[in-house]
Amino acid sequence: MNDLLPPLVSDGQIQAEINGCLGLITLNRPQALNALSLAMIRDLTTLLNHWAARPEIQAVAVLGAGREGKPPAFCAGGDIRFFHQAAHAGDPALGDFFTEEYRLNHLIHAYPKPYVALMDGIVMGGGMGISQGAKLRVLSERSKLAMPETGIGLFPDVGGGWFLAQCPGHVGEWLALTGQAIAAGDAIEWGLGDVFVRGEHWPALVEDLRHGAQPSAEHVVASVMERADLAPVSAPKATLERIDRHFGQRDLAAILDSLAQADDDWARDTHATLLKRSPTMMAVTLELVRRGRRLGLADELRLERELVHHAFHLRGAARSETVEGIRALAVDKDHQPRWQPDTVAGVDAAEVAAFFVSPWAPAEHPLRDLR
C-alpha cells in the first residue's frame, strides 16, 4: 500500500492516507487556518498526479484539520505573510507559488476521478481554489465562503475570475469587489457548492471516509449523499435584485454612485465596504470578472498569472497595492492601508489597462501548456 503514498515535502502540513479506493488528504496547518504554503501546494499536486495514474485509487477527498475547541477551517487562503516577505526580498519563489497554485487549481477542475471537497468552516481565497473544481463540494452551517482579496489590494485569483463569473446575474462582481462571505444556502444557490451536511453529522462522515468500507467511487459519494440535507434558506430575492441593480453598472464609478444614491442600509454598508478597498485593484477586479465570462478556465488562469505578476511588479514592491494591503492587514496590523490613489476618481485607466498586457510572449508564459 505504501507505493500509493508518494514522498511529501511539507513536513506534515499535508497528510495523506488510503482507505479502500479512497485517497484522503488532510490540510494540516490548523493554527494558520490551513492556509496554503508552497510546500503544501507541491504535495497536493504530487498526490493528485500520483493517484490519477493509480487504478487502485478511484476517488479523492480533501478536508482541513480542526483546532480543539475552535470553529473549523477548511482553508483560509494562501500564506500572505510569505507573499509580503518574498516581494520585498525579490524572491523568485513568489512567482513559483502562483504558477504552481494555479496549475494545481486547473488540475483539480480537470481531475479524472471524483474529487470531494469537505468545505467545513472557513473557505477563502486559496481554499476556494482547491475546492471549486471538485465534483462534489460539501458544505455545513459553519461554512463561510469568500474571495476577500480586494481587502489586501489583490484580485480574486485561483480561478476566481472564472468561477465567480459563472454566478447568476452580477453576484460575481459583488462577491469579487466586496469580498463578502456567504453561507451554505447562498453558495449552493449561486453554484459555489453542491451538498449540505449538518455539522452534527460531520464527525460520522469523516469517520466513515477514513475508516468505513470504501470499495468504490460510488460508495464514497454515497457516504456523503446519505447524510445530505436541505441547506438553510439563502439570500432573499430582494438582495439579488439589489446586487444586479448596483453591480451591473457599466464601471466602478457608476457602481459606487448607484450605491451612494440608494436609501437603504444594505447599499450604505456595501458602499462603505468598497470605500475601504484599493480603487486601482477594484478596477482590475471588475475587468477580470467581466472578461472571465468570455474565457475558458485555462485562458482565465493564464490571465490571472499575468495580473498577479503585475500586482507585485508593475510598480515595484515599494508601491505595490498588494504589498501595502498585506502590510496593513497581516504585518503591521494597523488596518490602515495607504492606497495610491485613494479614490476611484484618481484611478489611472492606462495603469489598469497595463495590468492586462502580458509580460510574456505566448511561448514563454508559465502556464502556456494548460488546456
Image (spheres, grey):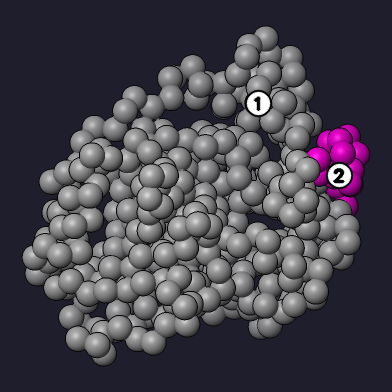
The kind of residue tagged 1 is Thr
Instruction: Provide the major secondary structure of the magenta segment.
Output: loop
Q: Is residue 289 left or right of residue 64?
A: right
Residue 50 locus on image (x, y percent): 34, 83
Q: Is residue 81 above or below residue 163?
A: below
Q: Where residue 338 is drawn, which disc sits there?
A: 2
The percent position of residue 307, horizontal first and vertical second, equals 71, 61
User: Is residue 338 a member of the stretch shown in magenta?
Assistant: yes
Q: Could you say which is closer to the camera, residue 316 or residue 167?
A: 316
Residue at (87%, 39%) from the top-left corner? 342
User: Which element carries disc 2, helix, strand or loop?
Assistant: loop
Question: Camera-side residue: 319 or 248?
Answer: 319
Q: Position of residue 213 (x, y in %)?
A: 8, 65
Residue extending furthest bottom? 3
Q: Which residues are magenta?
A: 336-350
Badge 2 crowding class, 10 Å Cα cut-off, few under 14, some 14 to 19, many 20 or more, is some
Let me know if residue 336 appears in the view.
Answer: yes
Quadrant location of the N terminus? bottom left
Q: Is residue 90 above or below residue 156?
A: below
Q: Residues within 10 Å of mark 1 (few under 14, many from 20)?
A: some
In which quadrant of the rendered view does residue 219 lie?
bottom left
> Residue visible at 42% across and 74% down?
12
Q: CA distance from mark 2 to mark 1?
A: 20 Å
Circle count: 2
- Left or right of residue 243, residue 202 in this image: left
Mark with earlier residue (2, 1):
1
Q: Amino acid at mark 2?
A: Arg
Which residue: 88% across, 52% down? 350
Residue drawn at (68%, 61%), measured in percent from left and top?
81
Q: Check residue 112 for magenta coloring.
A: no
What's the mark number on residue 270? Answer: 1
Q: Is 140 located above or below residue 129 in the figure?
A: above
